[in-house]
Image: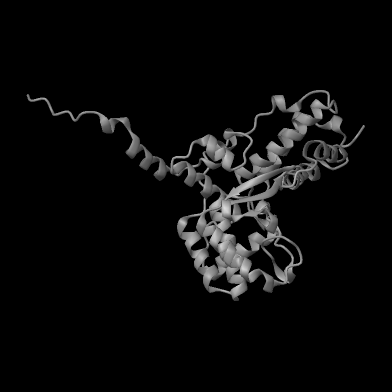
Amino acid sequence: MADLADLFEQFIIEEYAGRLNETPAAYRRKVGLFLRWAGPETPAAAFNLDTLNRFLVHLQTRQSKRRGSQTVPGPLSPAYIDSVLRAVLRFARWLAKCGHVAADVTLGFRKPRLPRPNPKAISSETVTALLRAAQNSGAPLERARNLALVYVLRDTGGRARAVANIELGDLQLERGRIRVMEKGAQAQTLHVSKPTAAAIRRWLKERPAAHPRDDRLFTGRYGWGLSYVGVYQVLQRLAKSAGVTARHNPHAFRHAFARDLITNGADISQVSALMEHHSPVVTIAYYARWADDELHAVHARASPVRHLPALRPKAD
């Protein structure tokens, strides 16, 4: 009888072979939590509904979490618990589909309902602060690269890995496009505006002085292209220079991109296509997030009561 760890490797190969984005790595991290808790040599036959329920309790009572490369005290957030459970449940359904377990143990499992999620978008004020820091800190070479990087993140909504993977041959600046390999065998199109294209061109003039050792657009230390972790690190340095403590990770740029498109009147199907989502349901569930004050303002603008005729009090 195969154990869960071996079957998980088979699951990754069958379900995610060829993926160039972070999905396989994310599944390894999240299902890895379950495998370490259950024991990697646990046979598939021992995986049942009780196992899932006990793992949920473990996640809800855990008092430490990873933050970057460090372990810090504190409970796991409901959103993170939900994402771990979704990964484990997908693995469990695959086990049932392939006949490695007698029944689909997820059918009787009740995943906790998430509270309405708060927006995760970077604010315009934070973007402005990062741009000023990029413009005013570091050598001319670094300033040009960092400005172009922030412009690309803000303008395209691209994932950090996709932005890090941009190569010189992907640039179609005269057409306002970048074609980059990001998911599977499909090339993703990032649309860029004229200010972003201008920032990229300024960086391209400086780039030879970085002594690049590969064809990726954004070079890091020693001339190698930035990794997606390097993208995070650049933003961290800019935030420190600008004194920014608000949300500023690459995915916050992606959230802001989606929210701005929706707010400015783009159809949800168009937003989904620009985000390279497989379904508008993903766009709605993870990116159409609004704070109470925002919803109140929308109601004030759009309430049908605004268009009713004013009624005068009836005289006694």
Residue 226 screen position, x and y as percent = 70, 62
Q: Where 176 sits versus 299, above or below?
A: below
Furthest-front residue in view?
174
Q: Would you place residue 66 above or below residue 46 in this image?
A: below
State the colouring used for the structure image: one colour
Residue at image location 58% in from the left, 56% down from the top = 152
Q: Give the farthest residue toward the left.
A: 316
Q: What is the x, y in percent for residue 49?
A: 75, 29
Which residue is rendered at x = 44% and y = 43% of the image? 263
Is 310 left or right of 174, judged from the image as shown?
Answer: left
Q: Can residue 178 be seen in this view?
A: yes
On the image, the x and y values in percent for residue 141 come to 62, 73
In the picture, the quarter occupied by the N terminus is top right
The answer to whether any part of residue 252 appears in the image is no
Residue 242, image x and y in percent? 52, 68
Location of residue 174 with respect to 108 vertically, above or below:
below
Vertical relation: 106 (above or below) 236: above
> Which residue is painted at 81% across and 32% down in the image?
47
